[in-house]
Structure formats: structure tokens, C-alpha cells
Amino acid sequence: MRLKQQLTEEQPVEAERELMYLETECEEAYHESKEYKRSRSEYLREHEVRIKFLTLGCVIEVGCKAIPFTTVEEGMKALNEYVANPHETIRVLNKKCYEEE
């Protein structure tokens, strides 16, 4: 605000142009840095979750991915992490899947 007053008093037309340029530049930088992130509930609704309990452990299927766990406790811990933060969990899972290919 002070910059606007100082520039406006000295050079009215040039000051307005400079201010408009700076505001536009700041808005563009803000929008470029902000990544769209779906809500937690959107992620959770996107894929069906199935749990298959085995003699030892379980298999948890999220969408088309099936992840085996040696114990039910490990599986439930992973499932709770997914429900708490699906965006990050999906990112990590996808990274692991593509590394193995």
C-alpha cells in the first residue's frame, strides 16, 4: 500500500502500470505453485477397498492393487494410514509399484 502511494505521487500512470504488473506476476506465481489436491473423501470414494483374511495375514485390495500383509495388525495399520492420508499413501504405493516394473 505504501509503495502504491509513493509511486502514485511521483508518476501516476507509470506507477499504476508497475503495480498492475507486480500484482499479476504475484498471482501467476501463486497459482503455479498451488497444486490441486482432491479432498480426502474424494480419494476414499474413488477406489473400492476389500480385505481378504487368510490363515496367516491378509490381502488388502485398493482399486486394482492387491497388497499382501504377513499379519492382520500390519494390514490394519496400513489401512488406517490410507484412510488418514489417502493422497500421500497412493503416491507412495504408485512409486513402489512402478519401481518394481
Image (tube, rainbow, N blue to C red):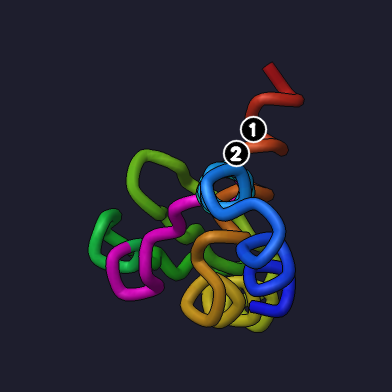
Residue 72 higher or lower than 16, as above or below: below
Q: Is residue 78 left or right of residue 49?
A: right
Task: Identify the residue shown where x is 75% and y is 25%.
Answer: 99
Most foreground residue, 57 or 95: 95
State the image coordinates of residue 68 (x, y, percent, origin top left).
Answer: 59, 53
Rendered-image quadrant of the C terminus: top right
Residue 100 higher or lower than 87, as above or below: above
Q: Amino acid at mark 1?
A: Cys
Most foreground residue, 92 or 64: 92
Secondary-structure class at tag 2: helix
Q: Amino acid at mark 2?
A: Asn
State the image coordinates of residue 38 (x, y, percent, origin top left).
Answer: 38, 61
Q: Is residue 70 visible?
A: yes
Secondary-structure class at tag 1: helix
Residue 79 lies in the magenta-colored region: no
Residue 45 higher or lower than 99, as above or below: below
Residue 40 lies in the magenta-colored region: yes
Which of the two discs, 2 and 1, sits closer to the camera? 2
Most foreground residue, 26 or 73: 26
Q: Which mark is residue 94?
A: 2
Q: Is residue 32 left or right of residue 3?
A: left
Q: Main secondary structure of the magenta part?
A: loop
Marks 2 & 1, CB-CB < 8 Å contact: yes
- Dot 1: within a 10 Å radius of its alpha carbon, few (fewer than 14), some, or many (20 or more) residues? few
Q: Is residue 30 visible?
A: no
State the image coordinates of residue 9 (x, y, percent, origin top left).
Answer: 66, 66
Task: Identify the residue shown where x is 60% and y is 76%.
Answer: 81
Give the image quarter of residue 74: bottom right
Badge 1 is on which residue?
97
